[in-house]
Image (cartoon, rainbow, N blue to C red):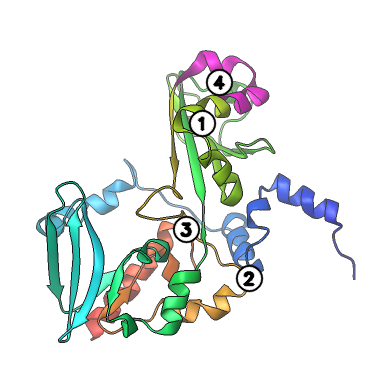
Amino acid sequence: MEYYSDGAIDMIGVLLDMEAYMGMSLIEVLREMIFFTSTTKYYEITGGMDKLSNAFLPQLREHILMQYKVDKIIQEDNKVMLQGNHEQTLEQFTITSDFAIITIPFSALRFVEVQPYYLFSYFKNRAIRELNYIAATKIAIEFKSRFWEKAGQCIGKSITDLPIRFTYYPSYGIHTPGPAIVIASYTWADEALTWDSLPQRDRIPYALKNLAEIYGDIVYSEFVTGTSFSWSKNPYSCGAFTAFEPGQELELFPYITPPSGKVHFAGEHTTLTHGWMQGAIESGVRVAYEVNEQ
């Protein structure tokens, strides 16, 4: 039996930008590769993906509490109570219900107190502690025109061994005049943490410098503005998405999805479709069925 050499493995990791996944579960990596190499169709909502969540507003508006953060989950007397406070006014709140559906990523759920402690089993608590969340950072830059199309890059992405790694180009408005936005950099895991070490003001210049090595100094004359976002620095997610480390699918996943008493769980981390809205939607359907069946 022949195997790839270490050099070949390194080359594949760089060219496919899979180095960030080298320490992840092989099954997790294969599943992710299948998503991108199969005949799967991808869909987007015309006008913006936020139209999906906004479609629920007419029915749920009166029940949505903005800027209120849950810091305690209590189950007693066959009821569930969620307690917390408003992040600006510090006004405290308590919500009592028959069931609770928790979609908080396990990385952030660690900061929520659970009473009684044994409400979550040993294995559930272990999953909350150990489930691996991968870091991710995106840098978006607006340019005056689509100069990359003149260089032959109309759609798709560029992969480089420069710090920006992935660059994604608009898939709409091809060959149209006027400004356009590029995801100049999309990095995962340790490569994302490298960008996180830079202050926000320095990320755009470094991304432009990397793009200039590909397209030349035109990136500076065409530059309009830019911004970046780090999911590992987001206190509401404490990471971008779940990525199993070796053995975690076998040891942790069976205990992630099942409810604990009156508390049910949803979110991409409760499915095997990690890092995609698809996983969140799948879990929403599952948990709605769970609650309605009780």
The residue type indicated by label 3 comes to Phe
Q: CA distance from mark 4 to mark 3?
A: 33 Å
Q: Secondary structure at mark 4?
A: helix
Residue 168 in the image, given as x and y percentages of width and height = 54, 38
Q: Are marks 2 and 3 in contact (CB under 8 Å)?
A: no
Q: Earlier in the sequence, mark 4 or mark 3?
A: 4
- Name the residue carrying label 1: 203
Which amino acid does the dot numbered 2 rest on? Pro
Label 2 and label 3: CA atoms lie apart by: 16 Å
Q: Amino acid at mark 4?
A: Phe
User: Helix, strand, or loop for circle 3?
Assistant: strand
> Pointer 3: what residue?
241
**Percent position of residue 20, x then y:** 63, 52
Nearest to N terminus: mark 4 or mark 1: 4
The residue sitting at 33% across, 43% down in the picture is 48
Front residue of this view, candidates 47 and 237 = 237
